[in-house]
Amino acid sequence: MTDPDTPSIVPINLDVAEHFREAADLLEAQDASPFRVRAYRQGASTLANLDRSVEDIYAEDEREGLIDLPTIGSSLANAIVEVLETGRWRYLERLRGIVTPALVFRQLPGIGPTLAERIHDTLGIETLEALEQAAHDGRLADVEGIGARRLQALRDALAARLRRRTSDTATVPVDELLDVDRAYRSKAAAGDLRTIAPRRFNPENEAWLPILHTEREDRHYTALYSNTARAHALDRTDDWVVIYREDAAQTQWTVVTETSGRLEGKRVVRGREAECLRYYQDESALTADQ
């Protein structure tokens, strides 16, 4: 006879709880904040002992219903929603070192694993921004499996996703991103960061890629050197830094050393060059005043 005081086992809750436990273990091994580690472990405990399915809670009360659960909050609710809607959690994949262009493309409706690999292999592109360009310049239409209806659906999905990402990126000042970049490169150069073994361009499965987890106010960031085909081809794997914010959109920025123009030699957030120019001008003026 079942003890009425014993919580029912809910498979989806246990699955997400296991994701949270793995994230906590990886974060701890990568020297992340103990508070983040504890948050995921507490969230895992909450879900494992919850007798109502997070799927039902989300269906009835949307994201706010998940946020209201004990120890869950906004960040963990975002993770639960992503798992429920896509079956994946990109943040955990990043911690494992297995993020690939194919996984990036599979964020979009209508792109499964086979088509995602075919897009990457055919076009050699690696980002949603590059995929959007290919969707409008005719290249994506030439990929097997992309008909007119799917192409239009992908254009719409990309527009919505990248519009939201652009809105999210603008809320973070460039000086904060440059500060994260500075901390990452300094610690990586000093050998003070834990390293992970990325799946791509790493045939010997060597743990060589430094990873930084850091916070600024209530914003949680992960920074890594770019491990893309283009970064390797241009020998920029120790210059291009990708910064991810742990939020609903998994917002990301790339910081590089500018090679020409007024910002030559400066660290610049790609896509936000004008703001970076103002930042360096203000910094120079402040230094001159001192």
Image (cartoon, helix red, strand yellow):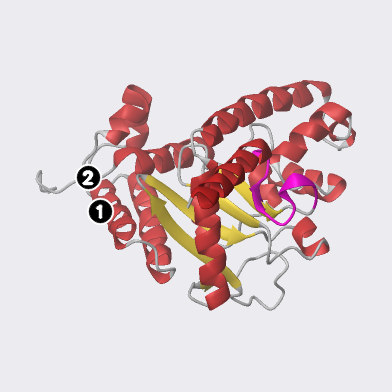
Q: Which residue is mark 2?
A: 8
- Percent across and percent down for residue 277 are 65, 41
The amino acid on which the numbered mark 1 sits, given as a three-letter code, is: Gln
Picture quarter containing residue 77? top left
Picture quarter containing residue 139? top right
- The first of marks 1 and 2 along the sequence is 2
For the point 68% across and 62% down, which residue is it?
Answer: 239
Q: Residues within 10 Å of mark 1 (few under 14, many from 20)?
A: some
Indicate the secondary structure of the residue bearing disc 1: helix
- Percent across and percent down for residue 130 are 76, 39
Indicate the secondary structure of the residue bearing disc 2: loop
- Magenta-highlighted residues: 260-272
Q: Do we see residue 112 in this rendering?
A: no
Q: Which residue is mark 1?
A: 42
Which of the pair 254/60 is nearer the observer? 254
- Percent across and percent down for residue 144 are 86, 37
Mark 1 or 2: in front is: 1
Q: Please say whether residue 107 is one of the residues in the magenta stretch.
A: no
- Percent across and percent down for residue 1 are 12, 49
For the point 41% across and 71% down, which residue is it?
Answer: 29
Which of the pair 133/101 is nearer the observer? 133
For the point 59% across and 75% down, which residue is it?
Answer: 207
Left or right: residue 115 compared with residue 183: right
Left or right: residue 92 compared with residue 140: left
